[in-house]
Amino acid sequence: MRRRRLHHQLEKREDTHRWLVSYADYMTLMFAFFVVLYAMAVVNKGQYPVFLEKLNQAVEHLTAQSQHIVSKDTLQFPKREMIDQNNTQAIAGQGPVQSNQSHDEAKVVANDNDVDEVAKTHDGEALDDVYKQLQAVINASGQNNAIKIERQQDWLTISLDNQLFFASGSATLLDSAKQVLAIISQVLTQNQNYLRVRGYTDDQKLDSELYRSNWELSVIRATNVLHQLVALGIAPQRLAVEGFGQYSPVVANTTAQNRRENRRVVIAISRFAWQSVEKQKSALQQSTKLTNKPQESHTQGDSKTILTVPLPGGGVRYTTRQDKQ
């Protein structure tokens, strides 16, 4: 009788605590579920720098494609790191360093005195004549307020109203800009004088995801003007780009009107002219025959890579030409 009661009590006790098994299984499953949720929520921060680097490379690649000049050879602009290094050395008084990059990358000249042997031997059309021609076409078009011409010793500069050329913070040419450039190109295509396209901005902080500084914005704007000039029939061998950013203002950036005057694009016409390599060789051969003396050929022609030349006042010039001015 006692044994039966004990057995009955044990069976009753076992049935009472059976729910703990199911509860333990439930808790185990819930624990595993929340572990999975936590693992999915944890972010691998170590991969963020890699992602940002790839993104920057893609943006730089697209920017470089928009800067290519349409010519016989495909040109590439120097990398940002190389430009920053040259600018730092130029400020420190060390001068730019000769680059050891491959042919496909940009070349940095150590001294721009070495690249003026050819350019200064050929005078172009007289700047006074070019000035008169430009004044005639500008007066006929009624764009006197948008175009200002200034005569200098070795240069004739054409200042273009930036408000007619670009929207604020943008480097895309407006339709009015294309009309103005079409007017100017009527004269510029009639000679072979070297041209420099110079970009300037004011000192306002740039809020843009495309350009990290006013310096870059000034270069891209000048480059887009250069592209339009090439499309209008001007030989790309005559052209070079210079970007000064906010570092060469014509007036102090104290008022809105002054800042507007500082935002400008300038096309500078050199008194010297470009000549093809064949013409240079022909001229040297004729000179050799006249003097009856052997002469060493200095016909370097145009570089197949872009030369980066730091400018006084903090600017930088990109060029494929072998000239100094």
Image (spheres, rainbow, N blue to C red):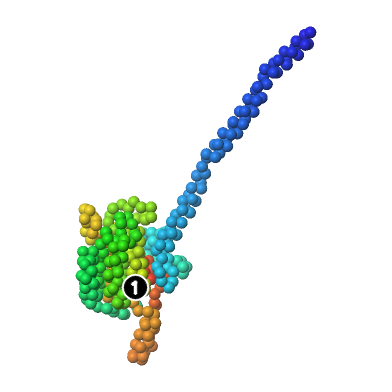
Q: Alpha-carbon neighbours of circle 1 within 10 Å: few (<14), some, or many (≥20)?
A: many
**Residue positioned 21% across, 73% down in the render:** 136
Can residue 151 be seen by looking at this rendering? no
Question: Which quarter of the image is occupied by the C terminus?
Answer: bottom left
Image quadrant of residue 305? bottom left
Query: Where does residue 322 sit, x and y in percent of width and height?
Result: 36, 74
**Residue positioned 35% across, 61% down in the render:** 220
Left/right of residue 204 with respect to residue 278 in the rendered view: left
Identify the residue position indicated by label 1 in the image: 234
In the rendered image of this protein, does residue 151 appear above or below residue 201? Answer: below
**Residue positioned 55% across, 36% down in the render:** 37
In the rendered image of this protein, does residue 151 appear above or below residue 162? Answer: below
> Which is nearer the eye, 81 or 29?
29
> Which is nearer the eye, 291 or 192?
192
Query: Where does residue 156 sit, x and y in percent of width and height?
Result: 25, 71
Question: Which quarter of the image is occupied by the N terminus?
Answer: top right
In the rendered image of this protein, does residue 50 appear above or below residue 240? Answer: above
* Residue with the most extreme top position: 1
Which element carries disc 1, helix, strand or loop? loop
Image quadrant of residue 310? bottom left
**Residue positioned 34% across, 90% down in the render:** 291
Query: Where does residue 106 sit, x and y in percent of width and height?
Result: 42, 66
Image quadrant of residue 289? bottom left
> Which is nearer the eye, 266 or 323?
266
Query: Where does residue 19 sit, x and y in percent of width and height?
Result: 65, 22
What kind of residue is marked 1?
Ile
